[in-house]
Image (spheres, helix red, strand yellow):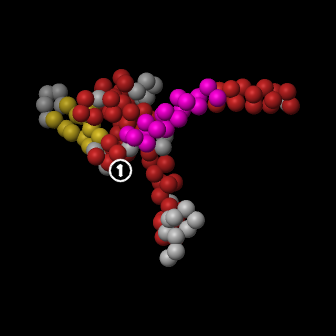
């Protein structure tokens, strides 16, 4: 098949158009996932205990952290290490696939830092115009 205008094959375009981006964003695009991955990125050896992650991700509930970690483990982004001690100890660590997400997250958070003031200003202008027209 000839490549499309941006150099991708038609098969690649169809694969992306089918469901992959939607599924990936559903599983990995929420705020808790990004914050948990960022927390693990800063931990020694990209590894931390549940309680360390909970304290490092402000505002996350125990239930939401549990669900997020399970989803990350299911998708191969995080591995869970259980130590049969008293009391039991569980640690979570970024896998190689999880580590490969760190650069895109860094680029995204850099973009946010760079554009946040402009976004706040745009919201202010929009809100002011909306309140005048209503």
- What residue is shown at x 48% (from left), y 34% (from top)? 109
Name the residue at the right extreme. Answer: 133
Q: Is residue 5 visible?
A: yes
Give the percent coordinates (x, y) of residue 20.
47, 58
In the image, residue 111 lies in the stretch drawn in magenta: yes
Report the residue that reaches farthest toward the left.
85
Q: Looking at the image, which is closer to me, 77 or 42?
A: 42
Where residue 118 appears, as percent x and y from the top left, is 64, 29
Res 46 quadrant in image: top left
Going 38% across and 44% down the picture, which residue do you hit?
101
Give the secondary structure at mark 1: loop
Query: Measured along the vertical axis of the image, is residue 96 above or below residue 61?
Result: below
- Residue range corresponding to the magenta coloring: 102-118
Percent position of residue 48, x then y: 27, 31
Along the viewing direction, whichever of 17 and 108 lies nearer the viewer: 108
* Residue 58 counted in the magenta span: no
Residue that carries the numbered disc 1 in the rendered image:
75
Residue furthest bottom as drawn: 1
Residue 70 seen from this side: no
Left of 96 or right of it: where is 67?
A: right
User: As displayed, is residue 77 above or below residue 12?
Assistant: above
130 and 118: which is toward the camera: 118
Q: Quadrant of residue 121?
A: top right
Residue 80 percent coordinates (x, y): 25, 41
Q: Residue at coordinates 81% horizontally, 29% vertically from top-left?
A: 129
Question: In the picture shown, does residue 70 fall above or below 10?
Answer: above
Magenta stretch, overall SS:
helix
Q: Residue at x 53, y 35 (%)?
A: 111
On the rendered image, what quadrant is the C terminus found in?
top right
The one nearer the camera, 87 or 99, is 99
Placement of 14 over or under 52, stated as above or below: below
């Amino acid at each position: 098949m000839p490549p499309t205008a941006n150099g991708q094959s038609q098969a690649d375009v169809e694969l992306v158009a089918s469901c992959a981006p939607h599924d990936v964003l559903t599983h990995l695009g929420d705020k808790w996932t990004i914050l948990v991955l960022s927390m693990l990125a800063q931990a020694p050896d990209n590894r931390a205990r549940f309680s360390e992650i909970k304290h490092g991700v402000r505002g996350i509930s125990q239930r939401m952290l549990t669900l997020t970690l399970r989803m990350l483990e299911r998708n191969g982004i995080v591995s869970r290490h259980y130590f049969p001690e008293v009391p039991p100890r569980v640690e979570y660590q970024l896998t190689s696939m999880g580590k490969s997400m760190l650069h895109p997250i860094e680029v995204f958070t850099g973009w946010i830092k760079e554009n946040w003031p402009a976004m706040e200003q745009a919201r202010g202008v929009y809100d002011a115009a909306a309140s005048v027209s209503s």
